[in-house]
Amino acid sequence: MRQFERHLMPRPLLLLATLLYFQVTTAAGAERNVAELFTSQGCSSCPPADAVAGRLRTNPAVIVLSIHVNYWDGPQWRDPFSSQVGTDRQYTYSRTLGEGSVFTPQLILNGTQSFVGSQESAIQHAITASRVAPPAQVDLSRQSDGTFLLTLAGSAKSADLWEIDYVQHSATQIRGGENGGRRLDTYNDAIQIRRLGIFAVGTMRLPALKPPANGLAVLVQTPGLGPILGAGAYEMK
């Protein structure tokens, strides 16, 4: 685990296949865990957690999102997936969860639990223990024109809707920094995070994915990045 100190005090710490696509959606009342891994290609402690993310994503009960922070970026290496919005998301979680620092690799499960991202056994145990059906249901279906029909059901009053577009798998040759000379495999790398508005039962259209994005997740989340109340995802093949 690598802590990053900036403004905060440090803390010790299913598949349905078609010819071209497969879709992963949330059925009404189904459990769907959301695992957000805050990672960086510039952090030498992160590759084991990236491998954990790769294994977790094979579980249809888990939506994995790798969110790359930018505070490891430097003159020797800049993570091409890093963003300020992703970094801000991690800092918001730190405040919401009452933590004293941010660190990499950090995995946030369902917006409520924080783990060192490489602690696979603890993460798997927490996933297994999460058996409560979410109050909100999310279904994503791809239309013939490439756009997506988002269908929302259930109850999640005043909750926020988040869209996260991602790349399912990336292999990057690192040319500098702590991981210089290594080839890193990362999974479900977020390349766009945007708030869609407030949860409301019904349907809405989402635009087609723009390459290199080939995965889309929608989260229903308590304001202020609180507990995740429902989620769905769609992946292209």
Image (cartoon, rainbow, N blue to C red):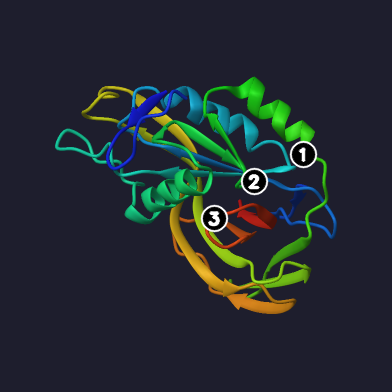
- Residue 171 image offset from top left, x and y in percent: 41, 35
**Distance from label 3 to label 2 (Cα)?**
10 Å
Provide the secondary structure element on which disc 2 rests.
Answer: loop
* Marked residue nearer the N-terminal end (1 or 3): 1
Q: Is residue 26 above or below residue 147?
A: above
Query: Does residue 180 appear left or right of residue 57 in this picture?
Result: left
Identify which amino acid the numbered label 3 is placed on. Leu
Q: Residue 199, position in %: x, y? A: 66, 72
User: Residue 74 or 6: which is nearer the viewer?
Assistant: 6
Quarter of the rendering containing residue 120: top right
Residue 130's tag is 1
Q: Amino acid at mark 2?
A: Asn
> Residue at coordinates 36% horizontally, 28% vertically from top-left?
3
Q: Which mark is first along the chain, 2 or 3?
A: 2
Frontmost residue, 19 versus 162? 162
Q: What whole-number distance in Å separates the C-alpha atoms at marks 1 and 2?
A: 9 Å
Q: Which residue is mark 3?
A: 225
**Residue beneath disc 2:** 110
- Quadrant containing the N terminus is top left
Using residue 32 as the reference point, say whether residue 212 is left or right of it.
left
- Reading the chain from its start, which is encountered first: label 1 or label 2? 2
Q: Which mark is residue 75?
A: none
Kindly tell me whether residue 88 is visible in this rendering.
yes
Horizontal side of residue 237 vs 175, given as left or right: right
